[in-house]
Image (cartoon, rainbow, N blue to C red):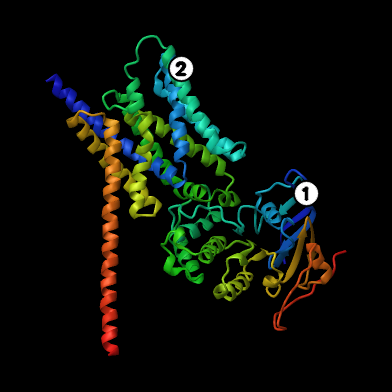
Amino acid sequence: MEGSIFQYDFIIKGLLGAVFASITAGLAGTYIVSRRMVFLSGGITHASFGGIGIGYFAGFNPVVGAAIFGILSALGVEYMSIKQKIREDSAIGILWAFGMAIGIIFIYLTPGYSPNLMSYLFGSILTVTNADIIALGIMSVILILYFSIFYRTILYISYDESFARTYSPYVNTFKYITTALIALTIVLNIRMAGVILVLSLLTIPPNIAMIFTRVYSRIIVWSILSGFVGIAAGYVISYYAGIPVGATIIFTLVLIWAIVKIIYQMIRSGKKDARRTTQDVEDKSLITNDK
Amino acid sequence: MSCLFEMHSVSVSYGSGFALRDVNFSVNESDFIGVIGPNGGGKTTLLKVILGLVKPVSGELVFNKDLVDGKSIGYLPQISTGDVSYPLTVTDVILSGMMIRKKIISRMSSSDKKRAAEVIGELGLSRMARSSLNELSGGQLQRVFLGRAIIGDPKLLLLDEPGNFVDSNFEKDFYDKLRDLNKRMAILMVSHDIGMISSHVKSYACVNMGLHYHPSSEITNEQLLAYGCPIQLITHGEVPHTVLKTHN
């Protein structure tokens, strides 16, 4: 009896986690992939590991530590790039390693063994708490509202920032808010996929969508859908095969990307062949007419 | 004829030396001004001051707020900074020009979209309305950015080197279009190519750190000396040309 309740709870948690993770990752991922911020997002992810380490050491929730580190490092990089004080990629590279270093030092200094550490590095649905799921749910609502209210504003600032500055005094405000939300999204998804794998959860789904559409709003929708399929399939496979869930999700997503790419190429070359055949027939009929 | 803005003793510096120095300049409602001068002379800086992208170190810029303010100007940049592989369609990019009429919350109404379709038609881009930017040629891309500059029906249109990408097929249409637009808006057109604009503008502003305004469209040899190098204009006698008075 207890076992079945546990299992039921586990499935509900997993399902909600998958829904919220795919919504948040789809919205944030489309933004970072379009704006070519993938490397920055990697920096934020790894910098937040510093917060996890300090959380362990000081005995508060590591997710809170990660959120503080993630948001501060994201805003810091955005600030430096706006002020053009430093080459952005170098700043990210430094932040990336520095965050990891702080994390490792503080975890090493924490007395005793940290059983959850692996779950932060590689993600685990087993250790995801109800609070994590609720936080992801709230994040989904915030992102949906933010992106639907300010859709064009966000889109045009991220497409051509200097042109946006000619008509809007709020360019920096929007950049800071969006980047902070992206950092928070990444940190909350670390519980699902882990520090090392969360970046692919954000970047693979938009790249699946961009194989067949270049319309921003459709990329968001297809990212969310493909992300959900990837996560859900990843759960099931990892459950039956007894392999780590984060890695399985990423493997599944890459597999989906490859399959969609191959199918799309086949359809395209099929269309081309059809066109060529019609052309051939027309050419031949022209030749016959000439005769 | 109402004045759109006035510049009083505006100077701009990017650190070492002046880009613009003590510039006094005003633009009226139906002006069509050619801004000419050598490379690095401050032409683009002048536009950036008007757009509020560059703050003067001294002097002031006063807009006639009833007609135009710094946020409602149409602008065609010399080099577009947008990423051509960004997932946006031609229609989306042109619609972004409507932002000069929007508040922070920026829904595009169906009349905005209808207006975009009209502009796309006028610029001969109908076939590409749903294409993404990386499918377009340089000239087509420039037309998209011109569309973005004019869709919001601004009172003031700033064009920075529009000739760079205008191919010969589109050139006549382009200048006809500008003449038509000039009935509704003032135009300030930057170009280093005097021959390109001399027959189209109503007056000139010569920018080489300082600004000399010529109310009528004539150019003199002395004025060409502002370039600091010999200028040759080779014609077959049929090319329209103009001569301006000398600077004081």
Helix, strand or loop at mark 1: strand
Q: Which residue corresponds to mark 1?
A: B18
The residue under label 1 is which amino acid type? Phe
Are discs 2 and 1 both within one chain?
A: no
Residue highlighted by disc 2 = A105
Give the left or right position of residue A62, taking residue B62 as reference: left
Query: Is B67 situated left or right of A144 in this image?
Result: right
How many residues crowd mark 2 within 10 Å: few (<14), some (14–19), many (20+)? some
User: Across the whole image, how many numbered discs are drawn on residues?
Assistant: 2
Q: Is residue A236 left or right of residue B225?
A: left
Crowding around mark 1 (Cα neighbors within 10 Å: few <14, some 14 to 19, many 20+) is: some
What residue is rendered at 48% in x and 34% in y?
A180
The answer to whether residue A65 is seen in the rendering is: no
Q: x, y percentage for residue A80?
A: 58, 36
Which image quarter: residue B135?
bottom left
Q: Choose mark 2 or mark 1, whichever is in front.
A: 2
Tag 2: residue type? Ile
Q: Nearer the viewer, residue A144 or B89?
A: B89
